[in-house]
Amino acid sequence: MSKAKIVLTALLTERLTVAEIAARYGVHRSWVYRLKARYEAEGDAALEPRSRRPHHVPSTTPTATIDLILALRADLTGRGLDAGADTIGWHLAHHHATAVSRATINRVLARHDARTPDPSKRPRSSWVRFAADLPNETWQSDFTHYRLTSPAGTPGADVEIITWLDDHSRMALHISAHRRITAAIVHSTFTKAAGQYGFPASTLTDNGMVYTVRLASRPGGRTRLETELRARGIKQKNSRPNHPTTCGKVERFQQTMKKWLRAQDPQPASIAELQQLIDRFAQEYNENRPHRSLEHRATPAAAYSARPKARPSRDRSRDTHDRVRTDRIDKSGVVTLRHNNKLHHIGIGRTHAGTYVRMLVQDLDIIVIDATTGEILRELVLDPTKNYQPTGRPRGPAPGHDNGGPTIS
């Protein structure tokens, strides 16, 4: 017999007061009053077990946010872009001013059958990551095939797409389509990318004959690329045969690019039309698409511009102490830097409190950059005689920021 029925029976048959019933059975008087009122209104139905679920849950994800998550999933998938929880969360934060955790987004997608399980993926614990420390420290390159579509909708000619990718930032420095990739095209695309972004310190490619002839059956002269790299002091690195994971970044990039290209309608019928699509993809990939492998889900363009660029070894004209420090601005708007075994405090501003930054240091010259957006927050020359490096601005909130106080006119 339930406690509710025992209490109610005693209340109705023994003619005890509510206080006496509550004391006898160890319950609160208010509960006895509610039970009595419910019995008078509903009869025996008042004794049935009731759900304890709250009528209102303040932490429930709003319906508008759920609809937005599903709409972003459909839009990104339809455009051939990554539509995982991390990417959706990035778009919510950057374009819709909405912060939703990765777990919540996954629950929403699972509840609405909007996920595509892939049990064949290797677990994250098995990944071994490596990346260059600076932009232009290593460029990866590879080419892939893509089938054009004839105006009648039938399969057309097979063409090849070459890519030069920055290893540190994953930024696509050059992508172009050609009838067939030759050693001359490899050299011309490399010099074209170098003319726009500067020459790298090293390159990483597979052992294709258009890149290197060191594994050729008949030794001969160097390719145009090998000659160019040797003349400029650029280190050439090649993966071992049958080890494509060494060039895994550019291989994975090509998979992302081809997935996007296949989602476009209509499909390209000529190399010129394919190149137009490639240029659109490069803009989307470099500047508008968050990259899951980059810190803070930054875009490749932001990651590329956030650090100084590496150069070929023989281009270094003087020996300086160059380093990169990652920090977070504290509540007082300050970051720290140790110089000559002495800790210095650098003022940035309270308005940037909590922001992750990168500090590019060359001897006493310092540039503080927002790690997510690439925005330069401060440039200064460190004064070793001072513990605190002031911003030089007057005290108080920065112009354009409301400190929450009353407005005095």
Image (cartoon, rainbow, N blue to C red):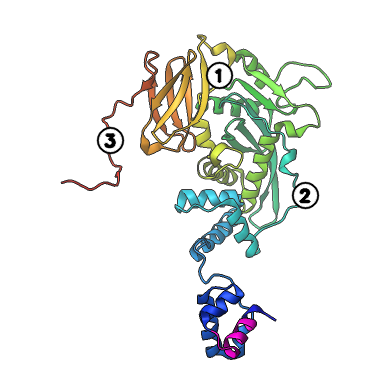
Magenta-colored stretch includes residue 166: no
**Disc 1 element:** loop
Residue 32 drawn at (x, y percent): 54, 79
Residue type, numbered disc 1: Arg
Is residue 13 part of the magenta span, yes or no? yes
Which amino acid type is shown beneath numbered disc 2?
Ser
Residue at x-position 73% and y-position 53%:
118
Query: Is residue 51 visible to the viewer in this orientation of the structure?
Result: no
Look at 51% across and 9% down and name the residue there: 317
Quick one: label 3 or label 2, which is nearer the N terminus? 2
| Most foreground residue, 147 or 126 | 126
> Can you say which quadrant of the picture contains the N terminus?
bottom right
Residue 388: name its quadrant: top left
Find disc 3 in the rendering and name its residue.
Answer: 396
**Nearest to N terminus: mark 1 or mark 2:** 2
Judge whether 146 appears above or below 34 on screen: above
- The picture quadrant where one finds residue 403 is top left
User: Could you tell me how far apart the alpha carbons at marks 1 and 2 are, in whole angstroms?
Assistant: 40 Å
The reply to whether the C-beta atoms of the residues labelled 3 and 2 are less than 8 Å apart is no
Tell me the distance, in whole angstroms, between the alpha carbons under discs 3 and 2.
Answer: 56 Å
Number of the label disc, if any, that sits on residue 120: 2
- Which label belongs to residue 139? none
Q: In the figure, is residue 106 to the left or right of 350? A: right
Tag shown at residue 311: 1
Element at badge 3? Answer: loop
Residue at 51%, 36% in the rendered image: 301
